[in-house]
């Protein structure tokens, strides 16, 4: 299992469209992927869970991935969340 603190740099924050894309990115991988913010931890493959976090630009989250493709999953999630425009 790997975990990493990532700062959200998507200009609009994680609104509906960026959340949908993030869920698509996460769903490409077999690994379990979770996003933590404060005391809440949700499955990155759950659109409702991710929307419930209500994350904004500049917030830091902890992303964790566990499974056979966890390294690739972490790279792609970080690349998406760190993009200024998504």
Image (cartoon, helix red, strand yellow):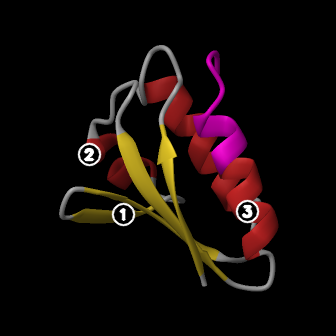
Identify the disc placed on residue 42. Answer: 1
Q: CA distance from mark 1 to mark 2?
A: 9 Å
Q: Residue at x 68, y 61 (%)?
A: 74
Mark earlier in primary sequence (3, 1)? 1
Tell me the quarter of the picture where residue 32 sits: bottom right
Q: Residue at x 39, y 28 (%)?
A: 58
Q: Residue furthest left?
A: 39
Where does label 3 land, which residue?
Answer: 73
Mark earlier in primary sequence (3, 2)? 2
Of residue 59 and residue 23, the one placed in the foreground of this image is 59
Q: CA distance from mark 3 to mark 1?
A: 16 Å
Q: Which residues are magenta?
A: 78-86
Q: Residue 84: x and y, percent?
A: 62, 18
Mark 3 crowdedness (10 Å alpha carbons): few <14, some 14-19, many ≥20: many
Circles 1 and 2: CB atoms closer than 8 Å: yes
Where does label 2 land, which residue?
Answer: 52
Identify the disc placed on residue 18. Answer: none
Tell me the quarter of the picture where residue 86 sits: top right
Magenta stretch encompasses residue 41: no
Q: Residue 78: x and y, percent?
A: 65, 47
Q: Is residue 24 above or below residue 16?
A: below
């Amino acid at each position: 299992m790997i975990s990493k603190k990532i700062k959200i740099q998507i200009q609009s924050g994680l609104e509906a469209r960026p959340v949908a894309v993030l869920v698509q990115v996460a769903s490409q991988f077999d690994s379990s992927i979770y996003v933590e913010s404060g005391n809440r931890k949700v499955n990155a493959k759950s659109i409702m869970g991710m929307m419930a976090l209500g994350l904004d630009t500049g917030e830091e989250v902890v992303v964790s991935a566990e499974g056979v493709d966890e390294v690739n999953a972490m790279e792609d999630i970080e690349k998406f969340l760190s993009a200024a425009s998504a």
